[in-house]
Image (cartoon, coloured by chain):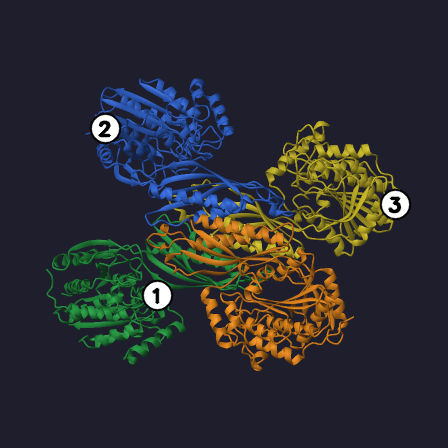
Chain colours: A green, B orange, C blue, D yellow
Amino acid sequence: MVPNINPPDDEYLTELRREFHRHPEPAWREFWTTARIVDELEQTDVDEIHVGPDAIDPAERLGVPDEAELSYWFEQARESTDRPDVLEKLQGGTTGVVAVVEKGDGPTVGLRVDIDALPIEESTGESHLPATEGFRSEHDGAMHACGHDSHVAFGLGTLETILESEFEGTFKVFFQPAEEVLGGGKPMAAGPHIDDVDYLLGVHVGLDHPTGEVVAGIDEALAFSKLGVEFEGESAHAGLAPNQGRNAVQALVTAAGNLYGIPRHGDGSTRVNVGNLRSENASNVVADRASADAEVRGETTALMEYMRDASVRVLNSAAEMHDCSVETSIKGQAPREDCDEEVVDLVADLAENHTDAVSSVVRRGTLGASEDFTHLLQAVKANGGAGTFVGIGTDHPSGHHTPTFDVDEDSLSIGVAVLSSAALELLA
Amino acid sequence: MVPNINPPDDEYLTELRREFHRHPEPAWREFWTTARIVDELEQTDVDEIHVGPDAIDPAERLGVPDEAELSYWFEQARESTDRPDVLEKLQGGTTGVVAVVEKGDGPTVGLRVDIDALPIEESTGESHLPATEGFRSEHDGAMHACGHDSHVAFGLGTLETILESEFEGTFKVFFQPAEEVLGGGKPMAAGPHIDDVDYLLGVHVGLDHPTGEVVAGIDEALAFSKLGVEFEGESAHAGLAPNQGRNAVQALVTAAGNLYGIPRHGDGSTRVNVGNLRSENASNVVADRASADAEVRGETTALMEYMRDASVRVLNSAAEMHDCSVETSIKGQAPREDCDEEVVDLVADLAENHTDAVSSVVRRGTLGASEDFTHLLQAVKANGGAGTFVGIGTDHPSGHHTPTFDVDEDSLSIGVAVLSSAALELLA
Amino acid sequence: MVPNINPPDDEYLTELRREFHRHPEPAWREFWTTARIVDELEQTDVDEIHVGPDAIDPAERLGVPDEAELSYWFEQARESTDRPDVLEKLQGGTTGVVAVVEKGDGPTVGLRVDIDALPIEESTGESHLPATEGFRSEHDGAMHACGHDSHVAFGLGTLETILESEFEGTFKVFFQPAEEVLGGGKPMAAGPHIDDVDYLLGVHVGLDHPTGEVVAGIDEALAFSKLGVEFEGESAHAGLAPNQGRNAVQALVTAAGNLYGIPRHGDGSTRVNVGNLRSENASNVVADRASADAEVRGETTALMEYMRDASVRVLNSAAEMHDCSVETSIKGQAPREDCDEEVVDLVADLAENHTDAVSSVVRRGTLGASEDFTHLLQAVKANGGAGTFVGIGTDHPSGHHTPTFDVDEDSLSIGVAVLSSAALELLA
Amino acid sequence: MVPNINPPDDEYLTELRREFHRHPEPAWREFWTTARIVDELEQTDVDEIHVGPDAIDPAERLGVPDEAELSYWFEQARESTDRPDVLEKLQGGTTGVVAVVEKGDGPTVGLRVDIDALPIEESTGESHLPATEGFRSEHDGAMHACGHDSHVAFGLGTLETILESEFEGTFKVFFQPAEEVLGGGKPMAAGPHIDDVDYLLGVHVGLDHPTGEVVAGIDEALAFSKLGVEFEGESAHAGLAPNQGRNAVQALVTAAGNLYGIPRHGDGSTRVNVGNLRSENASNVVADRASADAEVRGETTALMEYMRDASVRVLNSAAEMHDCSVETSIKGQAPREDCDEEVVDLVADLAENHTDAVSSVVRRGTLGASEDFTHLLQAVKANGGAGTFVGIGTDHPSGHHTPTFDVDEDSLSIGVAVLSSAALELLA
């Protein structure tokens, strides 16, 4: 049986989503976004709002951009928000919010939505609705190209629905930054609000499911780790005395070649890739610096760790081979954690009863890529809790992470209905 | 016996050098520089001034930057010159000038000076004279850090000295662009003004020789070739379907590793180096593009060609190995060509007689690095002519191509004296 | 219900197995083995015996050793057999036998057993039964270390059991050579005896299953291909003129490094390995020859082919990169082919009823390694037939392919009972 | 003026050379050779004969073959010599002899001749004189293909000439083993007989100089070092669990690729080469062992050491990269050491006076390859002595180290004449 719910109307959700769409901010730069969420939350009866360092553990952040980049976006946000008081707390890139509703004794249910955008230039094409309807990105080179604007709407819409409902227990919404770099899941899981969660819901829009389709549990995200790599050697004139150099390019190319050669594993699938290669020295100088990002994945967390440990060994010895040094830092990470049968079934059963909006239900889907929701799910399960990662189908005209990505706004209310029904069922 | 000469005074040379120092323009972007040289030449009795496409063969240019870069510098020049008429001829990066003085029958003597600057940010330090004396670079990120500003002064000063002298014959000054990328020598040698030159003088300031020392012939420049390399593959999601990619990073790193492994040659020294590495794809995407510059050198032109041919083979097969394609273009090149005994001796003898200014003479020096003066010298020798590359010592506080490089301006008049004496002696 | 069978007694099977154990012959050298099988078959009422080129398609053989090696083993066999007439047919390494029993109309059932040994020196240890009981290998450096001696006993014992039974149909035993190099399955599947087979049984002893355990279907053998690789370049003195060489070692090491780096595949597991490396040139000579074996595997035949095609591309371009040539030949190959439910169930049900000898039944097992039984199974399935690969447990004191491998001879009669029951059930 | 000498007759020298030619023994296996030299020496009035461990420092030997190989050759020698007493001293491969003649006070002059053969199968061709004249190698697969048989004749012939002459001083002949692997020079230089040598002569026949030509000083041997390399990892099934292996082949190929990439040196020529590659594991097993020889050279000893140190770093880090270990051992080594002007001139002047036999004299030649005579010369020079490496031309029908190499026996007496004249002149 579907709980009795009273969600916000479609127009509110659509406007909300469009407003966030106009203000895309990439990982750890969600300054305006965080401030706007807080502003909206303050207009509700929510019991607690935890912002920035009160929502996440800043020390656990991964993939934080450099000072200049943070400052640039901070200034952009300052110019377009009227909540400098909130911004203040986010300085240095400690973004994110946790909102809490408490109504007596009962279980604690969490909903995690991610809020960051991508470094992609949004289309201006005539068939791209955000462009023709006037809510295209206001930040050149940044775009909500993965639907996290809808996720914010899901989060706020669900919270408001819950606030209007009867239940016993606690409901929390985790507005998580930096999912796209798999850098925000860990600090949010390390923050102070996850430990008492009994049931956790995550959500993603689209993923090639059409409007009206709901996926009750999305599994098999590959465990993931991304290493930032900086080789340092010594420069020398390539004609006069190449021997006086310590060649960071040689170290990097030896490392890269051997990273791809890390042995396959008998226990399951692994991945490795090298990107973002850079060495700026002109060719007449033996390079003293060379950098790249290397990422590894595994079908299980252990397989990812096997790849990561082997990668570190390859990187260190490649540096040593060419008399260089290397600094490696983890720029993003996510374990493998699958959904729990009981919660998946609950969501599936509920969804199947939303016959007005939900046309089809997929009980189990697979992701193939990576998601740092698994950090939060892992923390919940470690405490005996359970959870699922729900897919809300939406007709999208082009693939995720492309300049013409868009969502079908009809799916906004479906998401809110499914998520708030599920939360209430779990709270009851 | 030293010819009787009447060079411009020191102050003129110093001011001239400082004006050019303030306006450093890198290879093929010497718009202001060319215009200013023309302007100065027009104030003399020089017989012919050939500008841009009339001075060089544009089709033979190597290492020309892209349109955006050329436009940027062209606009900068437009704002700071009052010779838009000259600029007009240089559009698209056809810089350079040849000036000709004709006085009756006699041999033709050429002087080549290079005019380009480097992409180096000039020091603002208190011990850096250009900074404290107010003639530091006016272009952020560009600097005359190899003394080509002095070379322009040598060229103009020598020309003016020759104009004041008695002789029979023809004197030409080749103001050559794009030496730093070894990209201007070839088009200037392919231009219409080199073929009748009987004697060619080249000149470089500094090179660790102190003020007062003159090197009559600098030899053993390594033959040089620089390949611009662009690998193109196909992108794919590194987690979902790495097999669907064609990995340009794998092609590049295999190529780079193997370039360094091209066998040493029994006939003499060779060099190889890879720099300017770049692949911008994020690490979660199999890279569809990766680029670098690879340069090779040889003790002889044949050795350089051995390395270049082997490099091309390595690059092509590395692309093929990873199912990618590769474009290689020659971005700079210079053959090995040594100085001629007779001209070296003449310069040495003359220099030894300048006892007031010249304190020591080195008959033969070696370069070790590369210089595209050899293109012009090769052309002259092919026609039965002869030449030398003269070093004019100068106390320089730090190495060439460093942010605090500077010349001792006392060396300006020494250079003009040595070069004009030698030219007149050869003309006589 | 278990068919009524009358198998040969245990002593016969044990003596047979020990006799073959004493005469281990590696792939395509099973001369004595083939002759002895023929000899034994001729003592039965079998209807047809097809030997060598009449049993297999010689042109499809993979991994055949060189002439010298074949001659050596052929001579060994000649000295220890009294069937020179059979040997005659096997010259050049066309080993193998197919035996046929025909009894009226009915289905055709095949049993494939492999007969080759391994290049392993058998233990002389006191705890190694074949050594203490006097049936240790009579060939230095060769050993039945994978139990194929038992497989021959299974084949002959099952055939004799069938001959004693009532049924309508045709029963064939495929005594297949060269399984250890995955080189005999293809020519046997391409031979004239597989096409009319309706049901095919394969069998393997051991595989870490104890005596008394039967595995009704072993699946998930990885598809496999092994490439023999020979690089040819040109030698030169490494001190005087390394440039005059074309370095086969550089080609090989570049190839090997990049083979390991062939991208993982999104559709499933792949494998790659390089072994048997050799370049005999002394280090003062640039190597003109270098060779290796490279093998690839895939969870499916398509995945193996992806790896094989990429390997060939890597090998060819590595040769080209170092101006060498390369010859690659397929030395072994096997597709992925899984067992059929119906036959697996039939075997499992029968085995469960052999309660005297069979203590436990595993319905489905997995192999993980590779087997060229899949070639025969693929051929049978292509014609609408079905089959399974049966495991007969045996207590083995050490792992397969080790010098102290041995089988528990109690498992011989279990194998004959299970296989002949299944064959009769399928024939009925 | 040429000293008055009385050398042995041509026939003696020819027979001697042919006897040694029939008994070629490779490095550290010169058992018969050493015994035969001792035997011959004992028939003269030589004052001291130091054999094996008394001639060299056994601990400094490089490139000693394994026990089995030594035993094989030791047994061969035992069967063909009648001097078991000498053989006794050579057990374990401590070959070589030093013979000393003392005649009162005066300088000490040394002559070094090398005595080892090569692992080359000698030609049986009709145009190969040793074959047609019956003195072809009696050891299959071994041959005096570099003329060291002639060197032994030079050594014995010169010694006998000196014994017949008047002089004051000491004359020593160093019959050095293991030159072909550059393994015997070091232990002979570390032995007890070099320290008092004032003048050292070395000699080589042929080297593309015709009969009658003498080279007074051969220089520019490249400094040399040869590293034996053994990687050890851990084997694993390449299909089931490649991750459980530690892949020695991956370590080797990464090392080899990077060895070739050790940066060229601004100070002069370097060389690197990898040969003798081997990994015997079949391709279905991750290799637990892989080995190779890597050799480096340099125009100077310092350049060789630069290469050697870089090689060791590459080898160690390649092992570490693939979680393997590596053992490296120096299997041969020679410094760069050039001839001394004064001794070269003395030899040249003498040779020019042998107008009967010597038709032309080259004062200075170059080697290009490597020679471990430099170890002895270095030791002599360290003590204030001087020396030269003399070339005795000989018409040779094919190159050194080929199966049809042979010497013109007319050059034997020329060598003895030049060397004994020079020795006497230095002794006088």
Same chain for the residues under marks 2 and 1 in the image: no
User: Secondary structure beneath disc 2?
Assistant: helix
For the question of whether residue D315 can be seen, the reply is no
Labels 3, 2: front one: 3
Q: Are marks 3 and 2 in contact (CB under 8 Å)?
A: no
Same chain for the residues under marks 3 and 1 in the image: no
Quickly name the residue at label 1: A119
User: Secondary structure beneath disc 1?
Assistant: loop
Instruction: Identify the image quadrant of the C terminus of chain B.
Output: bottom right
Measured from the top left, where is residue A303 in percent x and y?
36, 54
Callout 1 environment at 10 Å: few (<14), some (14 to 19), or many (20+)?
A: some
Q: CA distance from mark 2 to mark 1?
A: 64 Å
Labels 2, 1: front one: 1
Q: Amino acid at mark 3?
A: Val
Labels 3, 1: front one: 1
Q: Amino acid at mark 1?
A: Pro
User: Secondary structure beneath disc 3?
Assistant: loop
The mark tally for this picture is 3
> Is C286 displayed left or right of D39 in the figure?
left
Q: CA distance from mark 3 to mark 2?
A: 103 Å
Q: Residue at x 46, y 43 (%)?
A: C274
In-front residue for pair B249/A90 = B249
Residue at the farthest front position: B104
| Residue D2, numbered circle | 3
Would you identify the image quadrant in which residue C84 lies?
Answer: top left
The chain identifier of the residue carrying mark 2 reads C
Quickly name the residue at label 2: C426
Callout 2 environment at 10 Å: few (<14), some (14 to 19), or many (20+)?
A: many
> Is D91 displayed left or right of A60 in the figure?
right
In-front residue for pair C420/B76 = B76
Measured from the top left, where is residue B377 in percent x and y?
65, 60
